[in-house]
Image (cartoon, helix red, strand yellow):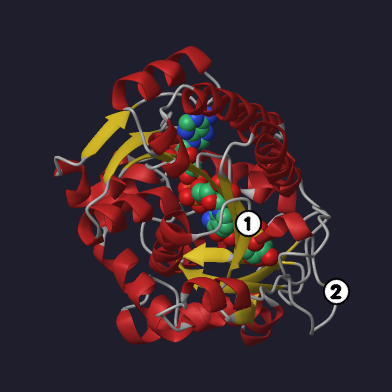
């Protein structure tokens, strides 16, 4: 089938396209506006395939989208285009409302017009797969409990609220207009080509540069980590075999406190990059506690039982194997890193989260 993927130049979208081109016979049309987070270099060899096409289009531009649907005649949509970073959404929510809510609304309308004009067999096969996050459920405030597909929505940040709104729009287009939708809500992804504003790549790059590793609050918040290639495989499985109108939660069964994640990265760097930056004797001495994120969610954890039972998907990477691959990838891919690092945004975080002072442990050593 031919799949129109929005956000295919981003972290997860590019993993989806690399997976589709390498492991399936489907064709892809990548629709991406190329914001700061979009980078065509992340497509690698997939971009050379005859089954790949790129269209630089903003999902808020109905006319341009109509033209792309008419010309490429997709058989499915996988919608990943979004503003995706919580800190940015606190700094400036407007882009999140525009792309995640308004943009999704525009895309849904264009997809519906297109779908309603298809002949019966093509209409029966058409799917609109909306890719979302577990952050729509808010947070879990104890060490037990898991998000299921029935957990009520209670988003905390402008990012998660905008994603929650987009999920509601997608379900409304199913219920009201009969658009055949699928929704997936996934936990935190990590892996190659991750923009270095997010926790894991930021910590790897800062440590290598001998810069502070800013842990928000006391670092006790818990995230469930999934290797991005496992997510890409799950998404294609849901598109191919998921039941229309259903939601599937996707997670890694890998819950770690932020501080544990940062310490794990430091330990891997000791092994894989033993030559420290000037003035640093141990990567972990760079750990620095900074002001907490406003509204910081305490714990996310996913029950991924439904996708496992119904569709047979399970993650292949453990956190240990995935994190090792990820650290090695960032050590080996300077060109990609230089390409995407501007630094301007980190200046805002530095000001907002406070001056980054050395950790108590490092101070005690001095
Ligand atoms: P990303 O920020 O790395 O990439 C987003 C992509 O969307 C970029 O290529 C960008 O250019 C494009 N884009 C942004 N605004 C656009 C617009 N108006 N029109 C067209 N393209 C636009 O994001 P990601 O981490 O790859 O996340 C992809 C999707 O998965 C998002 O919908 C996100 O909410 C969801 N998700 C992410 C995670 C995670 O851990 N990163 C977890 C669960 C779900
Ligand atoms: P992030 O990668 O931004 O993902 P999300 O907010 O969507 O979960 O952050 C992951 C966790 O790491 C989150 O609890 C915030 C924390 N964090 C830090 O402690 N320091 C940082 O510099 C960043 C970017 C995140």
Q: Position of residue 23 (x, y in %)?
A: 24, 62
Rendered position, 263 above or below 141 = below
Q: Residue 318 appears at what percent x and percent y?
A: 45, 84
Q: Residue furthest top?
A: 63
Counting residues from the start of the chain, the first of labels 2 and 1 encountered is 2
Note whether ligand 1 is within 8 Å of mark 1: no
Q: Residue at x 63, y 80 (%)?
A: 255
The 10 Å Cα crowd at callout 2, few under 14, some 14 to 19, many 20 or more, is few
Q: Say which residue appears at 42% left-offset and 41% top-offset.
A: 76
Q: In the rendered image, which residue does mark 1 sit on?
A: 246
Confirm whether residue 37 shows in the render: no
Give the residue drawn at x 43%, y 27%.
118
Mark linked to residue 141? 2
222 displayed left or right of 37: right
Foreground disc of the pair 2, 1: 1
**Residue 147, position as x, y percentages in the image:** 73, 70
Can the viewer see residue 104?
yes
- Residues 147 and 42: in front is 147
Displayed quadrant of residue 322: bottom left
In which quadrant is the C terminus drawn? bottom right
316 with respect to 220 (left or right): left
Asked whether mark 2 and ligand 2 are closer than 8 Å, the reply comes as no
Asked which quadrant contains residue 144, the reply is bottom right
Is disc 1 placed on a helix, strand or loop? loop
Closer-to-camera residue (69/100): 69
SS under mark 2: loop
Residue 4, percent across and down?
Answer: 38, 37
Decide which of 90, 136 is in the foreground and name it.
Answer: 136
The residue lying toward the viewer, choosing from 213 and 126, is 126
- Whole-number angstrom distance, CA of label 2 to CA of label 1: 27 Å
Which quadrant: the N terminus?
A: top left
Seen at 68% across and 85% down, the residue is 364
């Amino acid at each position: 089938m031919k799949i129109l993927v929005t956000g295919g130049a981003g972290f997860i979208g590019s993993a989806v396209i690399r997976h589709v081109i390498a492991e399936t016979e489907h064709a892809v049309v990548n629709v991406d506006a190329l914001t700061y987070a979009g980078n065509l270099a992340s497509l690698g060899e997939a971009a050379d395939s005859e089954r790949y096409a790129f269209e630089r289009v903003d999902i808020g531009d109905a006319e341009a989208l109509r033209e792309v649907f008419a010309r490429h005649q997709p058989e499915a949509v996988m919608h990943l285009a979004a503003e995706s970073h919580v800190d940015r959404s606190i700094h400036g929510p407007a882009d999140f409302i525009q792309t995640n809510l308004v943009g999704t609304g525009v895309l849904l309308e264009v997809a519906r017009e297109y779908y309603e004009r298809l002949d019966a067999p093509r209409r029966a096969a058409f799917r609109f797969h909306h890719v979302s996050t577990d952050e729509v459920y808010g947070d879990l405030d104890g060490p037990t409990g898991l998000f299921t597909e029935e957990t009520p929505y209670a988003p905390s940040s402008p990012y998660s609220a905008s994603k929650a709104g987009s999920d509601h729009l997608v379900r409304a287009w199913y219920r009201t207009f009969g658009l055949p939708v699928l929704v997936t809500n996934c936990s935190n992804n990590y892996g190659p080509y991750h923009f270095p504003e997010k926790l894991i790549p930021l910590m790897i790059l800062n440590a290598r540069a001998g810069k502070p590793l800013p842990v928000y609050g006391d670092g006790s918040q818990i995230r469930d980590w999934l290797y991005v290639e496992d997510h890409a495989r799950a998404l294609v499985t849901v598109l191919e075999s998921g039941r229309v109108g259903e939601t599937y939660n996707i997670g890694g069964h890998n819950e770690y406190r932020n501080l544990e994640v940062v310490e794990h990265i430091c330990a891997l760097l000791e092994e894989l990059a033993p030559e420290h930056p000037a003035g640093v004797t141990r990567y972990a001495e760079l750990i620095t506690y900074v002001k907490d994120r406003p509204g910081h969610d305490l714990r996310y954890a996913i029950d991924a039982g439904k996708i496992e039972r119904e569709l047979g998907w399970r993650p292949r990477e453990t956190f240990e194997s995935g994190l090792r691959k990820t650290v090695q990838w960032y050590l080996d891919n300077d060109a990609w890193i230089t390409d995407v690092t501007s630094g301007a945004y980190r200046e805002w975080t530095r000001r907002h989260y406070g001056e980054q002072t050395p950790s108590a442990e490092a101070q005690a050593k001095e």
